[in-house]
Amino acid sequence: MKKLILCTCNKTLTKWLDFARIEKEVGSTFESIHIHDALCLEEGLTFLDAEVSKDDTVVIGACTSQIIGVPLAERLKSELVSYVPLREHVAWVHKDDQKGATNKALVLLNDAAIHVDFLEPQTAVDIEMEKKVLIVGGGIAGLKVASDLLQLGIEVTLLEPPEFNSKDYLEKNQFMADSSTLKGVVKDLKTTSKGVKKVCGTISKLSGRAGLYSVSLKRDNGKEEEILVGAIIIATNSEHSPPSIAKMCHYGKTNQTLLLSELSTLIAKQTAKESKTIFVTQDPSYHDSSVAGSYLLREVTYAAEKGNTVIVAHSDIHTKDENLYRAARKSGVIFIRGSLEKVSKKKKGLVCRLENTLESQVREFTVDYLVLQTQLKPWSGTRPLADTLGLNLDREGFIKTRYAKMKPVQTSKRGIFIAGNAKTPMNLNDALASASNASLEVFKNLIADGERKGWIPVVDEELCDLCDACVEACPNDALRHEGDLIKHIPMNCEFCGICVSACPTRAIEFQSHSKDSWLTRIESIATKHKKLEGQKPFSLVYACSECANASIDQAGFAGKGYPTGSYVIQFPCAGMVSPIEILKGLVVGAEKIIVAHCPPGGCHHQTGDHLSELVVKFTQDMLKSIGQDPSRVKATYMIAALPNKMQEEVAHRG
């Protein structure tokens, strides 16, 4: 039975919507209509328990599904449910036009009635999880992850690069904290991670899927072995590299020029009577991070406290701890704003020529040692490791996260996580927090229940020509070309639908989101709008279910009004939108089609923002070639922090 259940939000929505008219005009569409004042409260949930059966199809007209969907999902027996955000998308943004708002509500409820006709139960996927974890990288974060998972009862293998020596923990991580703190943490982590199995070598091959990865390891002694793991955590170190000015400073040609990472070793051997003049300089072309800045301040303070004269030439020193700068000044460190111009080798020492930008003058210093600030770069084996595992790298060459804000320890591949300096240079506290976060995410995945549910892509073997477009487009390795078939890997699937847009033969249909469903709904919205609003123009907003939908919800919360003839159709991901849906919208009379996606680089499905921009650009070029106005189609990003974006995009219609 098809049922409509409306919520008045404690009767507040009755001020802006004519519920009596709605009930009357949709009477022939639904077999049962109920109006309730508080569906989200216990009395409303009890009502749903009694009213909705497993076989019913249900349309809920209430507040946004982001709010009401959570409590209702636990109480509704049926999975065939479509939500209409009458509060955020209608009532609160059209407060001055009750008739127009009610007309819009009728259009959206009619659309939802069609939507539930295409819905089918989600596919249940059995989860087989190997309760073992591989950690790649010996360092602070790697030890912390190993320690956490061992205490949670997870079997752990720690893979260290061939060149790594356990004695290097302090040396390779010295930029993260002061020496005494670092020693204490390393000592504790070594104690609590004693049960970990350590392997020295590299990964030569990866196969399988999230929860059941087969990893081929090549030991440094030449032997190979294969292990099964449920998850992989990348926790490799950053590396110290000479800056671009190293050659000018004669680095490698004289013992008087050294890196910041070598300074502490030199100072540790120094006696009280061996006071030196030490000149420390930044590379002006290198963007100094907070971690690098803090490291520099700690090292120069230590050198000054040992009785040396320390001069620091800098453009800007970033640090989250201002006390480090105060301690450096107190110890006698001299800071000069400027950049090194020339270095000459003389018998009495190195002559460093500096342009003091603050005083607009050139100064020269004769020093015993010239120290270059170390650049912190990804471990040298990061790129081949990423290629083997199928991971993406960022501009700096570090492992790229899936979504920095919401998924900071997830990589571009399901079941592979990231912690510590494999992501970016981190101080000690941040690295430990990152490691704990990764450990928790892995643990949650490994102890997951025996199945996960979702709508999945279905491949029609007769229509499929094995072009691999879907395989290449899938951001999650959920589609693979095996023999004469395109095989779906449900465990890897994020249910984004990007593969549907990529398929040139329409061989892939997404459960409950078929091409026919989109086209039918688009045509129905246009027909209903014209019946209720006549020649009044309308726009269609194809919004992703993440950032864009949240932004439109926020427009409602903030009361950012816009024309009533603006209809939002929610897609799992903007990357699922193809030229077919866009052209259909134009054919049925939409004045404008807006494809709203996540911000650049912030797509929850990694590539949806970029793909939707490409699809819109392709469609615009197509329209232009046949003499149509390409400006009727637009792609734009929307985020919750910018609730005015929806208002801006559709307000031009008046």
Image (tube, rainbow, N blue to C red):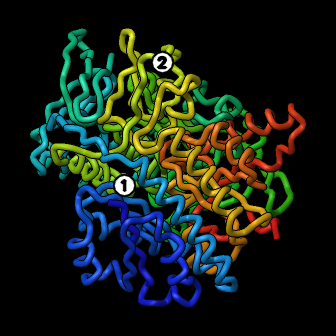
Q: Nearer the viewer, residue 542 or 181?
A: 542
Can you identify the residue that label 2 sits on?
Answer: 464
Mark whose residue sits in front, 1 or 2: 2
Density class for disc 1 (Cα within 10 Å; few <14, some 14-19, many ≥20) is: many
Q: CA distance from mark 1 to mark 2?
A: 51 Å
At 53% from the left and 15% from the top, the residue drawn is 467
At 37% from the left and 59% from the top, the residue drawn is 81
Quarter of the image for residue 165 reads top left
Dot 1 lies on which element? helix
At 85% from the left and 56% from the top, the residue drawn is 361
Percent from the top left, x then y, of residue 610? 62, 40
Can see residue 135? no
From the viewer's perspective, tell me whether residue 295 is left or right of residue 418: right
Density class for disc 2 (Cα within 10 Å; few <14, some 14-19, many ≥20) is: some
Look at label 2 and name its amino acid.
Answer: Cys
From the viewer's perspective, tell me whether residue 417 is left or right of residue 577: left
Percent from the top left, x then y, of residue 116? 42, 54
At 30% from the left and 47% from the top, the residue drawn is 121
Q: Residue 501, relative to residue 549: is it above or below?
A: above
Check the picture and name the quadrant holding the N terminus.
bottom left
Can you identify the residue that label 1 sits on?
Answer: 428
Which residue appears farthest toward the right when viewing the image?
627
Q: Residue 176, relative to residue 194: is it above or below?
A: below
Q: Nearer the viewer, residue 491 or 18?
A: 18
Check the picture and name the quadrant holding the C terminus.
bottom right
Look at label 1 and name its amino acid.
Answer: Leu
